[in-house]
Amino acid sequence: MTTFLFFKTKKQLLVFAFFTFLLNAGLLAQQSKVWDYPIHYGTPEWEKLTTFEEMLNAYNIPDSLLKNMTTKDLVATCLKYPNWVLITFGDTYQEGYDIISKLFNGFKELEQRPDAAKELIDIYCKMDPKGIIEFDTPVKQGTFCLQFTFIELLISQNKILRTLNKDSKTLVVKTLTINYDIKNGLNNYYSMHSLLPICLALGRIMEIDKPLIYSSLLTSNSNVNNIIDKGYVSDKNSFDQIINASKIYLKQLEP
């Protein structure tokens, strides 16, 4: 009650409250930045860790920072996660992602953000699979290829896909189908495993919307459900069928 005595009118109080809000919002924005994993392999702090569990926990973002991170910074942080390689520990990429999403709190937080899909798509639409031909060693090419795998796998998570509005859905379906065709045409660089996350994302988008073409796809090919549900690398024909169905679905989405 005594605080209000400093203000002669209600208008002055409201103006003060408004500028206080702006100040706090500005401070939070300044605090938000990409987490750079300060404790990592090669640092003195890392050398003090004695168990694998301690090493995994060292990558987690402090809660005080995590909750104040912008989604844009959180996406960048997740894409830089040092232990993405652990997705290969599962029988499928989806099982592998399920493993790392339980180990790193950034993934859990990202899946709860209503604007996660938007921020991921903004980055993904600026990526060009054809860029792989500019790299002259298998290691560099593999690193480039994995950048697509990581972001496509994040996009394909159901919690993230369910936040898509129609415009974002149309854009990402279009971009995913285009990138599939590009990767497919560069099969000396991109393997079946690199095509899988695209099929996973497109299949799950159709699974949510349930267009007629998706029902026909499931009826005609029993492998499709395993691809979409668990992320199994199936035969190339099944992948192509998912893409063809997605292109028909895209025509329904486009104005």
Image (cartoon, rainbow, N blue to C red):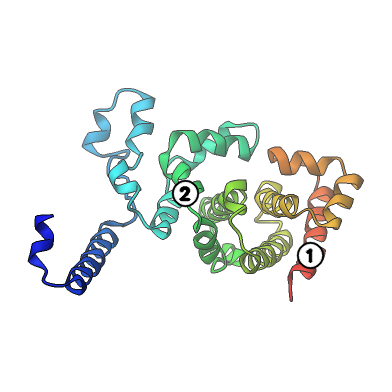
What residue would you read off at disc 1?
A: 247
Q: Is residue 233 visible?
A: no
Look at the numbered disc 1 and give the secondary structure of its residue. helix
Residue at image position (61%, 66%) is 168
Residue at image position (62%, 52%) is 162
Residue at image position (86%, 56%) is 212
Furthest residue to the top? Answer: 51
Quadrant showing the N terminus: bottom left
What residue would you read off at disc 2?
A: 110
Does residue 102 sit above or below 122 in this rendering? above
Q: In the image shown, does 14 or 192 lie closer to the viewer? A: 14
Q: Residues within 10 Å of mark 1 (few under 14, many from 20)?
A: some
Q: Is residue 35 left or right of residue 193?
A: left
Residue at mark 2 to residue at mark 1: CA–CA distance: 28 Å
Say what amino acid the circle numbered 2 marks. Leu
Q: Is residue 164 left or right of residue 105?
A: right
Look at the numbered disc 2 and give the secondary structure of its residue. helix
| Residue 117 locus on image (x, y percent) | 55, 58
Residue at image position (68%, 67%) is 170
Q: Are the two marked residues, 2 and 1, in contact with CB atoms closer than 8 angstroms?
A: no
Indicate which disc residue 174 carries: none
Say what amino acid the circle numbered 1 marks. Lys
Q: Is residue 102 left or right of residue 182?
A: left
Quadrant showing the C terminus: bottom right
